[in-house]
Image (cartoon, grey):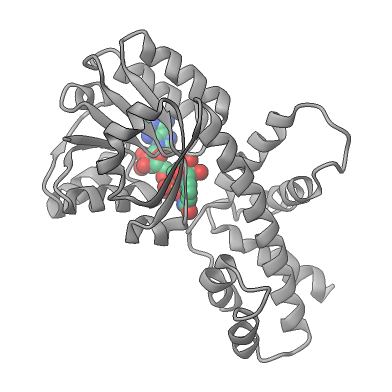
Amino acid sequence: METGFIGLGAMGKYMAINLSKAGYLKTVFNRTTKKTEIFKKEYKCLVSNSPSELATRCRLIIISVSRDQDVLDIVKQLITKISSNSIIVDTSTTSSKTAKKATDLLKKVNSYFLDAPVSGGVEGAKNGTLAMMVGGEKQVLKEARPVLNVIAKNIVHIGPTGSGQATKAVNQIMAAGMNQAVTEALAFGEAMNLPMEKVIKIVSTGAAGNWFLDHRGETMLSGKFEPGFKLSLHQKDLSICQSMVGSISENALPIIEMTLIHYKKLIDDGYGDEDISALFRLKQANLKN
Ligand code: NAP
């Protein structure tokens, strides 16, 4: 199925490359045209000048952009030119509410929306091994699945529209907990003057081993915080989680609350575009005081 891709960011670029290698990619759109120009030189595809132009060229469209409003703005442009029975697969992390709004907009032009957020980081996008959690019509996913198999190793249909994003919220709370645990533990180990390379090597093989330690442990210890997953984007995700549960008592979700406080400090200090492992900066500084 000929596919269009919107958003060549840290994640989108690699998903589009994998689609191109598999022969599915027909056209790309990115807001900043410099990225599409570079992409086009290496990977054969058409460059679309707008989402609406892209919609005239293919029936399956995959999106990877930053925030809720970005997704809705794009869907509003797509529906001006889209053909009936088109399928939009949104891999961005947004709220379930946004997924429902996008689905309603597409219904008006007889087309379909799947909320299909992904997990596995830039490494997963590069290797085509992402985990994809999908909300929307099962039959629509069945049609898109052969193409999606190129970017995700595990694809699970969770339930109706919005349930993919709700599942991603679960994932993001866990990711926050892991970030808190790994950055704090490694800053503690460093403060104890331990040989940290050896510490990572042994701890990662025991019960405390995890993805975040394996992929970000060494880089954070060497002071490298290139994204990865931008801290400001995880802040967005945790704010979505908070809004989903509505008004509950203070300290009911301490991992979310504490991480948002920490991220705000880091963003105020100018680290919002760094990887979420930049939380290590704060833990290190706290242990030095
Ligand atoms: P990123 O590197 O910041 O890229 C964001 C992309 O969205 C860029 O292509 C950007 O275009 C585009 N964009 C932003 N606002 C737009 C708008 N209003 N209209 C059109 N395009 C717009 O972000 P990322 O890390 O790839 O993340 C993309 C999505 O995946 C986010 O929702 C994020 O939460 C989620 N996610 C990220 C990771 C990760 O590890 N990075 C993992 C899983 C899920 P420009 O080039 O013009 O800025």
Figure quadrant of residue 246: top right
Q: Is residue 262 above or below residue 86?
A: below
Q: Locate the C terminus and report the quarter of the image it occupies.
A: bottom right
Q: Is residue 213 above or below residue 177?
A: below
In this view, the residue in front, 8 or 142, is 142
Q: Is residue 23 above or below residue 246?
A: below
Task: Report the image quarter containing ligand 1.
Answer: top left
Q: Locate the N terminus and report the quarter of the image it occupies.
A: top left
Q: Residue at x 84, y 31 (%)?
A: 248
Expressed as whole percent of the image width and height from the top left, the position of residue 159 reads 51, 31
Can I make out residue 125 in this image? Answer: yes
Q: Is residue 114 left or right of residue 287?
A: left
Q: Is residue 120 left or right of residue 197?
A: left
Expressed as whole percent of the image width and height from the top left, the position of residue 123 reads 41, 62
Q: Is residue 100 above or below residue 89?
A: above
In this view, the residue in front, 139 or 16, is 139
Can I make out residue 94 in this image? Answer: no
Expressed as whole percent of the image width and height from the top left, the position of residue 94 reads 53, 34
Q: Residue at x 72, y 83 (%)?
A: 190
In this view, the residue in front, 264 or 73, is 73
Expressed as whole percent of the image width and height from the top left, the position of residue 225 reads 53, 65
Question: How many marks are shown on the rendered structure?
Answer: 0
Q: Is residue 56 left or right of residue 235?
A: left
In this view, the residue in front, 208 or 240, is 208
Q: Is residue 37 left or right of residue 167?
A: left
Q: Residue at x 15, y 47 (%)?
A: 40
**Name of the residue lying farthest toward the top:** 108
